[in-house]
Amino acid sequence: MPLIESPSDPDLVPEDDAEHREPIGALRLGAVAAATVLAGYLLSATLLALATGTASGPEIGAGTLLAAAVPGWLVAHQVPLVVLGAPLSVLPFLPTAALGLLIAAITAAFLRRTGFDTARDAVRVIGAVAAGHAVLGAVLAALLSGAVDASVPGAFLRCGLVAAAGSAAGACRAGELPAAVRRLAGPTISAGLRGALLVSACVLVAGALVAVVALCLSAARAGEVLGRAGTAGDAFGLLLLSLLYLPNAALAGWSFAAGPGISVGGLTARFYETEPGAVPDVPLLAALPTGAAAWWWPVVLVLPVAAGAVVGLRCGRELDQARRPAAVAVAAAVASFGVLVVAALAGGSAGGGPFDPISLHSPALALVTFGWVLVPALPAVWLFPVPWRPADEFAAELDGAADPDDEERAELGGADGIGLDGADDVDLDDEEPDGAAEEVDEWDGVDEWDGADEWDGVDEWDGTGEPDDPDELDEEAGEPADESGSGGPAAADPGFEFDEAEWADLVRRAQEAEEPDQARSWSGDIHGDADVPEPRPRDDASRTADDDADGPASR
């Protein structure tokens, strides 16, 4: 069969270039966007059903519940609402975080299952998801009327940004998007972006610790608030509301520890001062102080300092010491910008009245976050340097490092020496196991010896003894072996000329120094042992031209 008509080997067919593959179709993009929208809507309806199902009052039908889930979907995207003429912009962060996780999971699953894992594919999916949420949010905000209202531009912008953030997080878990960002940003900025995630985690942990301690200290007041709720269903509703605002409380705890503090109407709480005021009957807000600042409150300053030190120790460890401070500065700047955005979203109006406004002082909080991260982090970078070596230098050193056994083998002759031929992997460090000599020096009984040395085919070996090592013969004769380990001068240098008679005399004198029963050797014809049997006739087919030309140098 001609080569051009031969069937192609699947192992030899190159894979399709990712850049030339068929792009993701509009149908698939619409499907993934619709899946994320539906997941968010089901989340909103579930939370609303829990809140209304346990509350006292008339029952709410399924149709009303599904209609009420539409404003809840907007709330999950941090879209401010106007309820009965009262603005409501202090929205819970827990539904937003849950929605982001759902969008990330759906995006990652879509990219894994379809195989569209390139950076371009990820950008297309992120754009489709963001556009779907933005357009739907604007449409829903325009359709709202009566008791609940929302801004159409605000709904478009916030729904799109929240969906884009969640989809980007999912694309980073499945695909080449992180690698593309690293190549585009460079090593220093990439390390800074990863450090910003570490800063965000430290901020949340420190703030949550402050919030938990405050709730524990005010457990009695929180119990009184639940007692005034009336029924168990109403108390459960208050607990559910407090649970949804827990991420807000963690951010407020960070603001308290960092210095700007929290303001709820006329009440202000900082670690060094307080201004009393009224608070709503919500168990979570019972953690706010009602009296003067305690003397031990400045202890919370340990948390920002510890957060900055952790960032300095961990950020940019893959960089050289000169570039680590720049990576720390990038991490602090990016994290501070994130704190600015989130703190601005966490503040606002809570329906008017004596509890407005609620503020975390977002501009001041962003500035002090940058300082609390950068000031402790830079000394940590300088005091605890990380040993660093360039990746290319390290790889070159690994590639150029020779195996000690290979070096020793090369000194002894390598592949040119007798007994160390290149096809045999000899371990010079280990002792020779039992029976190894028999496996190497075994004669096949006809005309060849299958060990490392080749038999010249002239004399026959009866197999009762072991052939003597040429190196041992050299040592017994008082002549040092050749450095190549071959046992003879000709093996080390094929061009070296020597007298065969002198070589035969040297071998004869070495064997005469031994006892009679040890004089038998693979070279019996040279030193004339009488006990060596006559060689058997060889087959002409097995005889080669090399058998007649080989001399002592090849043995």
Image: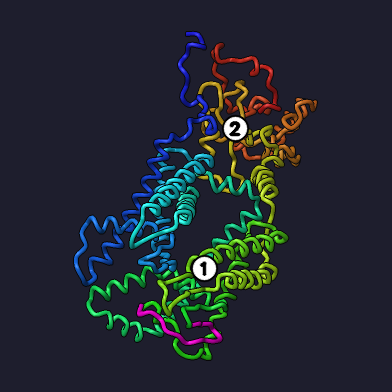
In the displayed structure, 367 sits above or below 418; it is below
Q: Position of residue 200 (x, y in %)?
A: 53, 65
Give the residue drawn at x 51%, y 29%: 16
Q: Nearer the viewer, residue 375 or 291?
A: 291
Amino acid tagged 1: Ala
Q: Is residue 272 magenta?
A: yes
Q: Is residue 414 left or right of residue 23?
A: right
**Count of numbered labels shown in the rendering:** 2
Q: Nearer the viewer, residue 290 or 243?
A: 290
Q: Give the main secondary structure, helix, strand or loop, of the magenta stretch.
A: loop
Q: Is residue 486 left or right of residue 158?
A: right
Q: Which residue has dot 1 on it?
A: 343
Q: Is residue 413 magenta?
A: no
Give the residue drawn at x 55%, y 21%: 447
Q: Quadrant of the C terminus?
A: top right
In the displayed structure, 411 sits above or below 185; it is above
Inter-mark Cα distance, 1 to 2 = 70 Å
Q: Is residue 435 among what the camera can see?
A: no
Give the residue drawn at x 38%, y 79%: 280
Q: Position of residue 524 (x, y in %)?
A: 63, 27
In the displayed structure, 526 sits above or below 92; it is above
Give the residue drawn at x 36%, y 70%: 243
Q: Which residue has dot 2 on it?
A: 423
